[in-house]
Image (cartoon, rainbow, N blue to C red):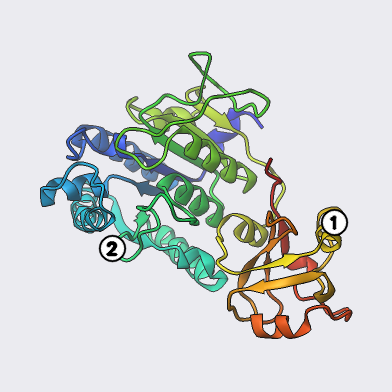
């Protein structure tokens, strides 16, 4: 797929990074955000549905509360995020009204992605907001969840780049635009126009004032691509960048979408971070990897955690490596009772198993 397909995009997710949304002192970058909102209003007037995922709440809140721009203490970061959300949303709401946009704040936590039912409810809610002509402004609800503030925790989304990719997948968006303080993925000092997985790129490091970095953006772009959503990483400092991307202009780094995939399976693979898991033996691991088999009780060595039937759990190999995610066909207690049995009723049906990429 070429960039020309972006010209036909009718539903777009735009993510604004911390360095784009705020100045170095944590105050809102009013000029940049104002210009961006004018672009989004113009897209809306052209009949294009837009969802905005915005960082910046921590910096804004820290400034309001007299804290350092990036507080080290997790409680201070949570307090800053809580205070900053009010200021951030107030800005978007007031500017949106001036531009004829109806904004709607959407705050998410990990549980909204763990549960298939909540994930579906989220999609339906956002769908209705778009039908009503609203601009959803989305962020993680750090007032009740520290997942995006604590870098040590395993999480569904620890930065708004991944959150934006998951929203784009859930909503079946045509394009995801990740705006940052860099012009795209760099290769030998030049912007890589189209993502090439064969290149050896140095993506280490995070943006000043942000929680992620280029690695986080690339990982999120690949999630978007795997979900069938085209993605571009570009500079939020360039006026008109959103319009350029959607006009097929070769700006930023383009990640073409994978046309294959199933929304339910994408949710299971990318939108869940299971806290419970089963460990399987070598035979079961081989059957899962090479034959796409169901998981039978005879192949399970141990069950970790407590969970009901229908919960998303991880499947670990004999060495502890994560092989797949799956939907439990029965609860943890029943699984433990069946361990070692040779019955043919699966603990996890093959249709409810999604293999994950092997890691070195």
In the rendered image, residue 46, in percent from the top left (x then y), is placed at 41, 41
Which numbered mark, 2 or 1, is in the foreground of this view?
A: 1
Residue 47 visible, this orientation: no
Q: Residues within 10 Å of mark 1 (few under 14, many from 20)?
A: some
In the rendered image, residue 147, in percent from the top left (x then y), is placed at 40, 58
Q: Element type at marker 1?
A: helix
- Could you tell me which quadrant the N terminus lies in? top right
In the rendered image, residue 221, in percent from the top left (x then y), is placed at 54, 39
Residue 133 visible, this orientation: yes
At a point 84% along the width and 74% down the height, the residue shown is 298
- Looking at the image, residue 36 sits to the left or right of residue 257; the answer is left
Can you identify the residue that label 1 sits on?
A: 286
- Looking at the image, residue 5 sits to the left or right of residue 73; the answer is right
Q: CA distance from mark 2 to mark 1?
A: 43 Å
Q: Quadrant of residue 207?
A: top left
- Looking at the image, residue 11 sits to the left or right of residue 242; the answer is right
In the rendered image, residue 131, in percent from the top left (x then y), is placed at 43, 60
- Mark sitting on residue 278: none
Q: Quadrant of residue 69?
A: top left
Q: Pick whichever, 109 or 33, lies toward us.
A: 109
Q: Element type at marker 2?
A: loop
- Mark sitting on residue 143: 2
């Amino acid at each position: 797929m070429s960039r020309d397909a972006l010209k036909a995009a009718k539903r777009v997710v735009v993510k604004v990074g911390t360095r784009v949304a705020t100045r170095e002192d944590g105050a809102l970058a009013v000029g940049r955000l104002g210009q961006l909102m004018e672009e989004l209003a113009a897209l809306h007037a052209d009949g294009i549905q837009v969802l905005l995922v915005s960082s910046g709440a921590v910096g804004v809140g820290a400034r309001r509360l007299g804290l350092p721009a990036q507080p080290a203490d997790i409680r201070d970061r949570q307090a800053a995020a809580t205070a900053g959300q009010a200021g951030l949303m107030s800005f978007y709401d007031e500017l949106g009204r001036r531009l004829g946009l109806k904004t709607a704040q959407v705050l998410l936590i990990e549980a909204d992605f763990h549960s298939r039912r909540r994930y579906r409810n989220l999609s339906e809610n956002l769908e209705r907001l778009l039908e009503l002509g609203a601009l959803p402004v989305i962020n993680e609800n750090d007032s009740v969840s520290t997942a995006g503030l604590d870098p040590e925790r395993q999480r569904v989304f620890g930065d708004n780049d991944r959150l934006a990719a998951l929203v784009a997948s859930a909503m079946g968006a045509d394009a995801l635009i990740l705006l940052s303080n860099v012009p795209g993925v760099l290769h030998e000092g030049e912007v890589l126009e189209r993502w090439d997985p064969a290149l050896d790129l140095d993506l280490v490091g995070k943006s000043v004032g942000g929680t992620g970095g280029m690695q986080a953006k690339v990982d999120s772009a690949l999630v978007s691509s795997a979900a069938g959503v085209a993605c571009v990483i570009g500079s939020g400092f360039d006026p008109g960048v959103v319009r350029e991307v959607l006009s097929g202009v070769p700006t930023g780094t383009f990640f073409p979408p994978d046309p294959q995939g199933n929304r339910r399976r994408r949710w299971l693979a990318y939108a869940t971070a299971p806290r419970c898991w089963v460990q399987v033996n070598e035979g079961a691991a081989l059957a899962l990897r090479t034959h796409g088999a169901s998981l039978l009780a005879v192949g399970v060595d141990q069950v970790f955690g407590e969970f009901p039937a229908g919960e998303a759990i991880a499947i670990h190999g004999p060495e502890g490596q994560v092989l797949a995610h799956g939907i439990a066909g029965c609860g943890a207690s029943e699984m433990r009772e069946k361990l070692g049995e040779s019955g043919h009723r699966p603990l996890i049906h093959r249709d409810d198993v999604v293999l994950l990429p092997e890691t070195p």
